[in-house]
Amino acid sequence: MKFDLHCHSHCSDGELSPADLVALAGECEITHLALTDHDTLSGLAEAAEAARKREIQLINGVELSCSWNGQLLHILGLGVDPENTGLLQGIKINMERRTVRALAMVGDFAEHGIELEEEVDTLLKGAVPTRPHFAQALVNLGYARDKRQAFKRFLVPGKPGYVPMQWPNLEQISEWITEAGGVAVLAHPLRYNLTRSKLLRLIGAMQNVGVLGMEVSTSTTDRQQTDMLADLAVQHDLLASVGSDFHSLDQPWARLGSAQPLPAHLVPVWSELTIS
Ligand code: AMP
Ligand code: MN
Ligand code: MN
Ligand code: MN
């Protein structure tokens, strides 16, 4: 069995359609795939249909933005019921916040003499509006060489196009996921540049609000980092997850299926999911 429980389609900031993503998962010999688009479940039906045609099990997922102590965090909901009213309501809240932010970003860029509205609209095609869409628009219009540069010159605090966000708190997000029958999992724990003591405080807070898991193996964690996260998972009884955070084919550092298998002594998150 080969698991990849974190990736994105063009329903949020990924490049591929859900069906093409599942086809790629097949080429990568992934047997269990979770599609985890940012703040939307809209790609799951297409992905499920594509997965049925192959021998791939699709796990319904989502990646929700939230804040904890002023820190932006990404929490994955794995194995959620995509029809759960509470979760759908929560997702709608995040979507509305994203829409308001996107309009404010367009306004802020305009104040800096950069007109992005048309290009962003063309790129979105109904997807969840994310900063990578703005980054791509900046590249397409010649304001940045690539998306990475766009995220250096724009879109981040102190730079044009940055609009601070108020996300729901950790407890709220955990509740939406759990009530929808899913397992809440901290995504890419090392991406937030937390000190060890802050990471330990976060794990304590997660346990208080029912975030039961943590990604231990990702496409960018090296052996030493995986071992460190594995130790934390064991010490704090967290379920361990594995995910590449694949977005697009032009990001060689996050290829689909590239996260290493979990160390054998961990309790994998799929022990709590219905899989075969
Ligand atoms: P948003 O949730 O709309 O604020 O966008 C966050 C997404 O932007 C993340 O999920 C990443 O996919 C992407 N992202 C953040 N920082 C960078 C960066 N420096 N370069 C490329 N993509 C980035
Ligand atoms: Mn993303
Ligand atoms: Mn993320
Ligand atoms: Mn992600």
Image (spheres, rainbow, N blue to C red):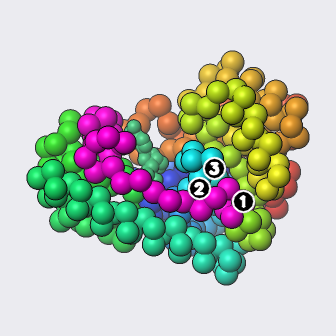
Q: Residue at x 29, y 58 (%)?
A: 105
Q: Are marks 3 and 2 in contact (CB under 8 Å)?
A: yes
The kind of residue tagged 3 is Trp
Mark 1 CB within 8 Å of ligand 3 = no
Q: Residue at x 67, y 81 (%)?
A: 85
The kind of residue tagged 1 is Glu
Image quadrant of residue 232? top right
Q: Which element type, helix, strand or loop, lies under badge 2?
A: strand
Q: What residue is disc 2 on?
A: 66
Asked if the magenta segment contains residue 158, the reply would be yes
Q: Nearer the viewer, residue 74 or 18?
A: 74
Question: In this rendering, does residue 266 appear at all?
Answer: no
In whole angstroms, how far apart are the C-alphas of marks 1 and 3? 9 Å
Indicate which disc, 1 or 3, sits on the residue closer to the N terminus. Answer: 3
Q: What residue is disc 3 on?
A: 68
In whole angstroms, how far apart are the C-alphas of marks 3 and 2? 7 Å
From the viewer's perspective, tell me whether residue 37 is left or right of residue 34.
left
Please rate how many residues cluster around mark 2, counting C-alpha atoms within 10 Å: few if below 14, some from 14 to 19, many from 20. many
Q: What residue is disc 1 on?
A: 171
Please rate how many residues cluster around mark 3, counting C-alpha atoms within 10 Å: few if below 14, some from 14 to 19, many from 20. some
User: Is label 3 or label 2 in front?
Assistant: 3
Write the start and end of the magenta stretch as one range. Answer: 146-174
Q: Which element type, helix, strand or loop, lies under badge 1?
A: helix
Name the quadrant of the C terminus: bottom right
Asked if the magenta segment contains residue 270, the reply would be no
Image quadrant of residue 133? bottom left
Which residue, as the protein is rendered here, is positioned at the far left?
Answer: 113
Which mark identifies residue 263?
none
The kind of residue tagged 2 is Cys
